[in-house]
Amino acid sequence: MWRLLFCPILACAGPLVFRAGPPELSKNSGGIAFPMNDAEYQKFVNQGMRNVIPVRKLPAGVSFDARYGYNFVIGGKNRGWVLDGDDVRGWVLYLDTEGTGDLSAARPEPFEKVDGVFQLSKEVSNGNERWPIRFQVTRVKEENEEKLAVAIQTTIDRRGTIEINGGRAAFILTGDYGRYDKADGRVGFDRKDAGEFENYKISDHYVNLFGKTYEFSVDARGDALTLEESDTNLPERPALKPGTPAPSFASTDIAGKPQRLEDYRGRMLLIEFWSTSCGPCRMEAPKMVKFFNETAKEWVSFLGVSSDESEARLRDFLKEMGISWPQIREPWEGDIHRTYRAQGEPTYFLVGPEAEILDSWVGGGLAIDRISRYLKPH
Protein backbone atom coordinates (compact mmCIF):
# COMPACT_ATOMS: atom_id res chain seq x y z
CA MET A 1 0.00 0.00 0.00
CA TRP A 2 1.30 3.46 -0.95
CA ARG A 3 -0.10 6.42 0.93
CA LEU A 4 1.16 9.93 1.56
CA LEU A 5 -1.10 12.41 3.33
CA PHE A 6 -0.59 16.12 3.76
CA CYS A 7 -2.54 16.09 7.05
CA PRO A 8 -3.96 13.58 9.56
CA ILE A 9 -6.42 11.28 7.77
CA LEU A 10 -9.29 11.69 10.27
CA ALA A 11 -9.24 15.48 10.30
CA CYS A 12 -7.94 16.36 6.87
CA ALA A 13 -9.54 19.30 5.06
CA GLY A 14 -6.93 19.58 2.29
CA PRO A 15 -5.71 17.32 -0.49
CA LEU A 16 -5.09 13.60 0.04
CA VAL A 17 -2.33 12.04 -2.04
CA PHE A 18 -2.27 8.28 -2.68
CA ARG A 19 0.81 6.76 -4.28
CA ALA A 20 0.53 4.42 -7.28
CA GLY A 21 2.54 1.27 -7.86
CA PRO A 22 4.91 0.56 -10.77
CA PRO A 23 3.70 0.88 -14.38
CA GLU A 24 2.57 -2.23 -16.23
CA LEU A 25 1.03 -2.74 -19.66
CA SER A 26 -2.72 -3.28 -19.57
CA LYS A 27 -3.67 -6.94 -19.77
CA ASN A 28 -6.05 -6.60 -22.72
CA SER A 29 -4.61 -7.00 -26.19
CA GLY A 30 -4.93 -3.36 -27.29
CA GLY A 31 -6.08 -1.74 -30.53
CA ILE A 32 -6.30 -3.78 -33.71
CA ALA A 33 -4.49 -2.90 -36.95
CA PHE A 34 -4.86 -4.96 -40.12
CA PRO A 35 -1.56 -5.38 -42.04
CA MET A 36 -1.94 -4.40 -45.69
CA ASN A 37 -0.31 -5.38 -48.95
CA ASP A 38 1.37 -2.68 -51.03
CA ALA A 39 -1.71 -1.69 -53.04
CA GLU A 40 -3.92 -1.50 -49.94
CA TYR A 41 -1.32 0.52 -48.07
CA GLN A 42 -0.84 3.05 -50.86
CA LYS A 43 -4.60 3.59 -50.99
CA PHE A 44 -4.58 4.07 -47.20
CA VAL A 45 -1.70 6.57 -47.38
CA ASN A 46 -3.28 8.53 -50.23
CA GLN A 47 -6.28 9.39 -48.06
CA GLY A 48 -4.18 12.27 -46.74
CA MET A 49 -4.68 11.74 -43.02
CA ARG A 50 -3.06 14.21 -40.70
CA ASN A 51 -0.04 13.23 -38.57
CA VAL A 52 0.62 10.05 -40.58
CA ILE A 53 4.23 9.31 -41.61
CA PRO A 54 3.97 6.59 -44.30
CA VAL A 55 6.63 4.00 -45.05
CA ARG A 56 8.52 5.17 -48.14
CA LYS A 57 11.56 2.88 -48.18
CA LEU A 58 11.49 -0.81 -47.27
CA PRO A 59 14.12 -2.73 -45.30
CA ALA A 60 16.51 -4.84 -47.35
CA GLY A 61 15.61 -8.48 -47.74
CA VAL A 62 11.91 -8.36 -46.83
CA SER A 63 9.80 -10.99 -48.53
CA PHE A 64 7.24 -10.41 -51.24
CA ASP A 65 4.51 -11.18 -48.71
CA ALA A 66 5.58 -8.50 -46.22
CA ARG A 67 2.71 -6.32 -44.95
CA TYR A 68 2.46 -2.65 -43.98
CA GLY A 69 0.83 -1.28 -40.85
CA TYR A 70 0.04 1.85 -38.86
CA ASN A 71 -0.69 3.12 -35.32
CA PHE A 72 2.88 3.09 -34.01
CA VAL A 73 2.55 6.52 -32.42
CA ILE A 74 5.37 8.62 -30.95
CA GLY A 75 5.11 12.34 -30.32
CA GLY A 76 1.63 12.47 -31.81
CA LYS A 77 2.91 11.15 -35.16
CA ASN A 78 1.40 7.94 -36.54
CA ARG A 79 4.38 6.02 -37.88
CA GLY A 80 4.43 2.97 -40.10
CA TRP A 81 5.83 -0.54 -39.71
CA VAL A 82 6.42 -3.63 -41.82
CA LEU A 83 5.50 -7.16 -40.70
CA ASP A 84 7.26 -10.11 -42.33
CA GLY A 85 7.17 -13.88 -41.80
CA ASP A 86 4.54 -16.48 -40.97
CA ASP A 87 3.49 -18.79 -38.13
CA VAL A 88 5.99 -21.46 -39.18
CA ARG A 89 9.12 -19.36 -39.73
CA GLY A 90 8.18 -16.85 -37.08
CA TRP A 91 7.45 -13.13 -37.41
CA VAL A 92 9.65 -10.04 -37.44
CA LEU A 93 8.70 -6.37 -37.26
CA TYR A 94 10.45 -3.33 -38.73
CA LEU A 95 9.52 -0.10 -36.93
CA ASP A 96 9.89 3.51 -38.05
CA THR A 97 11.44 4.62 -34.75
CA GLU A 98 13.06 7.67 -36.38
CA GLY A 99 9.81 8.96 -37.87
CA THR A 100 11.24 9.46 -41.36
CA GLY A 101 9.35 6.81 -43.35
CA ASP A 102 12.75 5.32 -44.32
CA LEU A 103 13.08 1.74 -43.05
CA SER A 104 16.03 0.82 -45.25
CA ALA A 105 18.33 0.67 -42.19
CA ALA A 106 15.73 -0.67 -39.74
CA ARG A 107 16.70 -3.85 -37.92
CA PRO A 108 14.26 -6.77 -37.75
CA GLU A 109 12.78 -7.25 -34.29
CA PRO A 110 11.68 -10.86 -33.75
CA PHE A 111 8.46 -11.88 -32.03
CA GLU A 112 8.55 -14.42 -29.21
CA LYS A 113 5.93 -17.09 -28.81
CA VAL A 114 4.37 -16.67 -25.36
CA ASP A 115 1.52 -19.01 -24.37
CA GLY A 116 0.94 -19.76 -28.04
CA VAL A 117 0.84 -16.07 -29.08
CA PHE A 118 3.52 -14.27 -31.09
CA GLN A 119 4.34 -11.05 -29.25
CA LEU A 120 7.02 -8.37 -29.19
CA SER A 121 7.50 -6.05 -26.21
CA LYS A 122 9.86 -3.10 -26.16
CA GLU A 123 10.32 0.35 -24.66
CA VAL A 124 10.10 3.54 -26.72
CA SER A 125 10.77 7.15 -25.79
CA ASN A 126 9.94 10.72 -26.71
CA GLY A 127 12.20 13.25 -25.00
CA ASN A 128 12.14 12.47 -21.28
CA GLU A 129 9.04 10.29 -21.56
CA ARG A 130 9.48 6.52 -21.82
CA TRP A 131 6.81 3.83 -22.04
CA PRO A 132 6.43 0.15 -22.95
CA ILE A 133 4.62 -1.09 -26.03
CA ARG A 134 3.51 -4.57 -27.06
CA PHE A 135 2.68 -5.99 -30.49
CA GLN A 136 0.80 -9.29 -30.89
CA VAL A 137 0.16 -11.20 -34.09
CA THR A 138 -3.42 -12.42 -34.00
CA ARG A 139 -6.42 -13.27 -36.16
CA VAL A 140 -9.75 -11.47 -36.15
CA LYS A 141 -12.96 -12.91 -37.57
CA GLU A 142 -14.62 -10.39 -39.84
CA GLU A 143 -17.50 -11.09 -42.20
CA ASN A 144 -17.06 -14.83 -41.55
CA GLU A 145 -13.43 -14.59 -42.64
CA GLU A 146 -10.40 -14.89 -40.37
CA LYS A 147 -7.97 -12.06 -41.08
CA LEU A 148 -4.39 -11.45 -40.03
CA ALA A 149 -4.18 -8.61 -37.50
CA VAL A 150 -1.70 -6.98 -35.14
CA ALA A 151 -2.85 -5.90 -31.68
CA ILE A 152 -0.90 -2.88 -30.41
CA GLN A 153 -0.96 -2.11 -26.70
CA THR A 154 0.38 1.22 -25.41
CA THR A 155 -1.97 1.57 -22.44
CA ILE A 156 -0.19 1.52 -19.07
CA ASP A 157 -1.75 0.88 -15.67
CA ARG A 158 -0.55 1.89 -12.21
CA ARG A 159 -2.43 0.57 -9.18
CA GLY A 160 -2.96 1.87 -5.68
CA THR A 161 -5.37 1.97 -2.74
CA ILE A 162 -7.45 4.78 -1.21
CA GLU A 163 -8.23 4.67 2.52
CA ILE A 164 -10.24 7.48 4.10
CA ASN A 165 -11.92 7.29 7.51
CA GLY A 166 -12.30 3.52 7.33
CA GLY A 167 -13.41 3.49 3.69
CA ARG A 168 -11.27 1.55 1.25
CA ALA A 169 -11.20 1.56 -2.55
CA ALA A 170 -8.58 0.35 -5.00
CA PHE A 171 -7.74 2.53 -8.03
CA ILE A 172 -6.01 2.13 -11.38
CA LEU A 173 -4.35 5.04 -13.20
CA THR A 174 -4.39 4.44 -16.95
CA GLY A 175 -2.18 6.39 -19.35
CA ASP A 176 -1.06 6.21 -22.95
CA TYR A 177 2.38 6.90 -24.41
CA GLY A 178 3.85 7.57 -20.97
CA ARG A 179 1.39 10.28 -19.87
CA TYR A 180 -1.39 10.00 -17.31
CA ASP A 181 -2.68 13.57 -16.97
CA LYS A 182 -4.22 14.13 -20.40
CA ALA A 183 -7.92 14.94 -20.54
CA ASP A 184 -8.75 11.49 -21.97
CA GLY A 185 -6.54 9.65 -19.47
CA ARG A 186 -8.48 7.42 -17.10
CA VAL A 187 -8.81 6.51 -13.45
CA GLY A 188 -10.61 3.33 -12.49
CA PHE A 189 -12.20 3.32 -9.03
CA ASP A 190 -13.31 0.13 -7.28
CA ARG A 191 -15.87 2.11 -5.30
CA LYS A 192 -17.57 -0.94 -3.76
CA ASP A 193 -14.28 -2.71 -2.96
CA ALA A 194 -15.59 -5.66 -4.98
CA GLY A 195 -12.96 -5.95 -7.73
CA GLU A 196 -15.09 -4.03 -10.25
CA PHE A 197 -13.53 -0.83 -11.56
CA GLU A 198 -15.52 2.11 -12.97
CA ASN A 199 -13.59 4.24 -15.44
CA TYR A 200 -13.48 8.03 -15.11
CA LYS A 201 -11.74 10.38 -17.52
CA ILE A 202 -9.31 12.89 -16.07
CA SER A 203 -11.62 15.55 -17.53
CA ASP A 204 -14.51 14.23 -15.38
CA HIS A 205 -12.75 15.81 -12.38
CA TYR A 206 -15.13 14.43 -9.73
CA VAL A 207 -15.94 11.04 -8.19
CA ASN A 208 -18.31 9.95 -5.42
CA LEU A 209 -16.56 7.91 -2.72
CA PHE A 210 -17.75 6.84 0.73
CA GLY A 211 -20.83 9.08 0.56
CA LYS A 212 -18.94 12.23 -0.44
CA THR A 213 -17.86 13.92 -3.68
CA TYR A 214 -14.13 14.39 -4.29
CA GLU A 215 -12.26 16.30 -6.96
CA PHE A 216 -9.46 14.14 -8.34
CA SER A 217 -6.29 14.76 -10.35
CA VAL A 218 -3.28 12.76 -11.52
CA ASP A 219 0.28 13.94 -12.12
CA ALA A 220 1.86 13.57 -15.57
CA ARG A 221 3.97 10.52 -14.67
CA GLY A 222 1.14 8.76 -12.86
CA ASP A 223 3.01 8.60 -9.57
CA ALA A 224 -0.01 9.53 -7.47
CA LEU A 225 -3.74 10.19 -7.34
CA THR A 226 -4.85 13.33 -5.48
CA LEU A 227 -8.31 13.72 -3.92
CA GLU A 228 -9.84 16.82 -2.36
CA GLU A 229 -13.30 16.85 -0.82
CA SER A 230 -15.81 18.98 -2.75
CA ASP A 231 -18.39 21.35 -1.27
CA THR A 232 -20.96 19.98 -3.73
CA ASN A 233 -22.41 16.46 -3.77
CA LEU A 234 -22.84 15.25 -7.35
CA PRO A 235 -25.52 12.75 -8.46
CA GLU A 236 -24.45 9.26 -9.49
CA ARG A 237 -23.64 8.92 -13.17
CA PRO A 238 -25.01 6.25 -15.58
CA ALA A 239 -23.38 2.84 -15.17
CA LEU A 240 -22.96 2.20 -18.96
CA LYS A 241 -22.88 -1.54 -18.32
CA PRO A 242 -24.73 -4.19 -20.36
CA GLY A 243 -28.32 -4.43 -19.16
CA THR A 244 -28.42 -0.87 -17.76
CA PRO A 245 -30.34 2.01 -19.39
CA ALA A 246 -28.53 3.92 -22.13
CA PRO A 247 -28.29 7.63 -21.25
CA SER A 248 -30.69 9.91 -23.11
CA PHE A 249 -29.31 12.51 -25.50
CA ALA A 250 -30.73 15.20 -27.76
CA SER A 251 -28.80 16.84 -30.58
CA THR A 252 -29.05 17.77 -34.25
CA ASP A 253 -27.24 15.95 -37.04
CA ILE A 254 -25.36 17.64 -39.87
CA ALA A 255 -28.49 17.42 -42.06
CA GLY A 256 -30.36 19.56 -39.52
CA LYS A 257 -32.50 16.67 -38.26
CA PRO A 258 -33.07 16.26 -34.49
CA GLN A 259 -31.55 13.12 -33.02
CA ARG A 260 -32.80 11.66 -29.73
CA LEU A 261 -32.25 8.27 -28.17
CA GLU A 262 -36.00 7.93 -27.62
CA ASP A 263 -36.64 8.11 -31.37
CA TYR A 264 -34.88 4.75 -31.83
CA ARG A 265 -36.99 2.74 -29.40
CA GLY A 266 -38.26 -0.50 -30.91
CA ARG A 267 -35.07 -1.37 -32.76
CA MET A 268 -31.36 -1.66 -32.02
CA LEU A 269 -29.08 1.35 -32.40
CA LEU A 270 -25.30 1.36 -32.92
CA ILE A 271 -23.67 4.59 -31.72
CA GLU A 272 -20.18 5.11 -33.16
CA PHE A 273 -17.80 7.75 -31.76
CA TRP A 274 -15.24 8.42 -34.49
CA SER A 275 -13.55 10.99 -36.74
CA THR A 276 -12.05 11.13 -40.22
CA SER A 277 -8.57 11.60 -38.70
CA CYS A 278 -8.83 8.17 -37.00
CA GLY A 279 -6.97 5.56 -39.07
CA PRO A 280 -8.89 2.50 -37.76
CA CYS A 281 -12.16 4.38 -38.32
CA ARG A 282 -11.30 5.02 -41.95
CA MET A 283 -10.24 1.41 -42.45
CA GLU A 284 -13.52 0.22 -40.91
CA ALA A 285 -15.76 2.53 -42.95
CA PRO A 286 -16.12 0.58 -46.25
CA LYS A 287 -16.68 -2.69 -44.35
CA MET A 288 -19.33 -1.07 -42.17
CA VAL A 289 -21.11 0.41 -45.21
CA LYS A 290 -21.23 -3.00 -46.88
CA PHE A 291 -22.37 -4.69 -43.67
CA PHE A 292 -25.05 -2.06 -43.02
CA ASN A 293 -26.47 -2.14 -46.54
CA GLU A 294 -26.40 -5.92 -47.02
CA THR A 295 -26.94 -7.37 -43.55
CA ALA A 296 -27.73 -5.06 -40.64
CA LYS A 297 -29.98 -2.34 -42.04
CA GLU A 298 -33.20 -4.28 -41.44
CA TRP A 299 -32.46 -4.87 -37.77
CA VAL A 300 -30.30 -2.03 -36.44
CA SER A 301 -29.94 1.72 -37.01
CA PHE A 302 -26.51 3.37 -37.09
CA LEU A 303 -25.70 6.80 -35.67
CA GLY A 304 -22.29 8.45 -35.96
CA VAL A 305 -20.97 10.98 -33.43
CA SER A 306 -17.95 12.62 -35.05
CA SER A 307 -15.35 14.83 -33.37
CA ASP A 308 -14.28 16.32 -36.73
CA GLU A 309 -13.53 20.05 -36.53
CA SER A 310 -14.31 20.50 -40.22
CA GLU A 311 -17.84 19.70 -41.36
CA ALA A 312 -16.70 19.95 -44.99
CA ARG A 313 -14.03 17.28 -44.42
CA LEU A 314 -16.60 15.07 -42.73
CA ARG A 315 -19.14 15.51 -45.54
CA ASP A 316 -16.52 14.73 -48.19
CA PHE A 317 -15.58 11.48 -46.45
CA LEU A 318 -19.22 10.43 -45.99
CA LYS A 319 -19.84 10.99 -49.69
CA GLU A 320 -16.68 9.16 -50.69
CA MET A 321 -17.49 6.11 -48.55
CA GLY A 322 -21.24 6.09 -49.24
CA ILE A 323 -22.11 6.44 -45.55
CA SER A 324 -25.83 7.12 -45.40
CA TRP A 325 -26.65 6.98 -41.70
CA PRO A 326 -27.03 10.19 -39.63
CA GLN A 327 -23.99 11.98 -38.24
CA ILE A 328 -23.82 14.29 -35.23
CA ARG A 329 -20.73 16.50 -35.11
CA GLU A 330 -19.51 17.72 -31.71
CA PRO A 331 -16.12 18.22 -29.99
CA TRP A 332 -14.39 15.37 -28.20
CA GLU A 333 -15.54 16.98 -24.92
CA GLY A 334 -19.09 17.48 -26.24
CA ASP A 335 -22.19 16.44 -24.34
CA ILE A 336 -22.72 13.01 -25.92
CA HIS A 337 -19.01 12.12 -25.78
CA ARG A 338 -18.97 13.00 -22.09
CA THR A 339 -22.26 11.27 -21.27
CA TYR A 340 -21.14 8.03 -22.89
CA ARG A 341 -17.55 8.47 -21.68
CA ALA A 342 -16.02 7.60 -25.06
CA GLN A 343 -12.54 6.24 -24.38
CA GLY A 344 -11.03 6.47 -27.84
CA GLU A 345 -11.82 6.40 -31.53
CA PRO A 346 -13.66 4.37 -32.52
CA THR A 347 -15.82 3.66 -29.46
CA TYR A 348 -19.09 1.78 -29.96
CA PHE A 349 -22.29 1.32 -27.97
CA LEU A 350 -24.94 -1.13 -29.12
CA VAL A 351 -28.32 -0.15 -27.64
CA GLY A 352 -31.30 -2.51 -27.52
CA PRO A 353 -34.94 -1.89 -28.53
CA GLU A 354 -35.87 -0.86 -24.98
CA ALA A 355 -32.96 1.60 -24.80
CA GLU A 356 -30.84 -0.79 -22.77
CA ILE A 357 -27.10 -1.16 -23.36
CA LEU A 358 -26.38 -4.52 -25.00
CA ASP A 359 -22.65 -4.17 -25.59
CA SER A 360 -19.84 -1.62 -25.82
CA TRP A 361 -16.23 -1.77 -27.02
CA VAL A 362 -13.28 0.36 -28.09
CA GLY A 363 -11.23 -0.12 -31.26
CA GLY A 364 -11.65 -1.08 -34.88
CA GLY A 365 -12.01 -4.52 -36.42
CA LEU A 366 -14.59 -5.83 -33.92
CA ALA A 367 -17.87 -4.14 -34.81
CA ILE A 368 -19.28 -6.52 -37.42
CA ASP A 369 -18.72 -9.63 -35.34
CA ARG A 370 -20.15 -8.07 -32.17
CA ILE A 371 -23.24 -6.63 -33.86
CA SER A 372 -23.88 -9.93 -35.65
CA ARG A 373 -24.36 -11.70 -32.32
CA TYR A 374 -27.58 -9.76 -31.82
CA LEU A 375 -29.01 -9.91 -35.34
CA LYS A 376 -32.07 -12.07 -35.98
CA PRO A 377 -31.77 -14.98 -38.43
CA HIS A 378 -32.66 -13.97 -41.94
Image (cartoon, grey):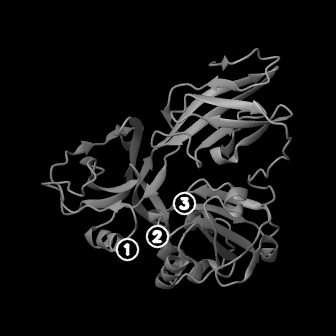
Q: Which mark is residue 282?
A: 2
* Label 3 to label 2: alpha-carbon separation: 11 Å
Instruction: Identify residue type, mark 3.
Output: Glu
Q: Which residue is mark 1?
A: 47
SS category of the residue bearing label 3: loop
Tell me what residue is drawn at x 59 percent, y 48 percent: 183
Q: Do the CB atoms of the residues marked 3 and 2 lie less than 8 Å apart?
A: no
Which is nearer the N-term, disc 3 or disc 2?
2
- Rendered residue at 65%/84% (across/down): 255
Upstream in sequence: badge 1 or badge 2: 1
Question: Residue 63's spot in the image, x, y percent?
Answer: 18, 58
- Image quadrant holding the N terminus, namely top right
Work out how far the residue at label 1 is from the one at label 2, CA to CA, in angstroms. Answer: 9 Å
Q: Left or right of 290: which side holds 127?
A: left
Separation of residues labelled 3 and 1 (CA atoms)? 18 Å
Q: Is residue 372 visible?
A: yes
**Number of numbered tags placed on the structure image:** 3
- The outermost residue toward the left is 60
From the image, tell me which residue sits under label 3.
345
Answer with mark 3 or mark 1, whichever residue precedes in sequence.
Answer: 1
Mark 2: few/some/many CA within 10 Å (<14, 14-19, 20+): many
Q: Is residue 284 left or right of residue 299?
A: left
| Res. 116 in view | no
Left or right position of 295 against 321: right
Q: Quadrant of residue 100?
A: bottom left
Q: Which tag is nearer the camera, tag 1 or tag 2? A: 1
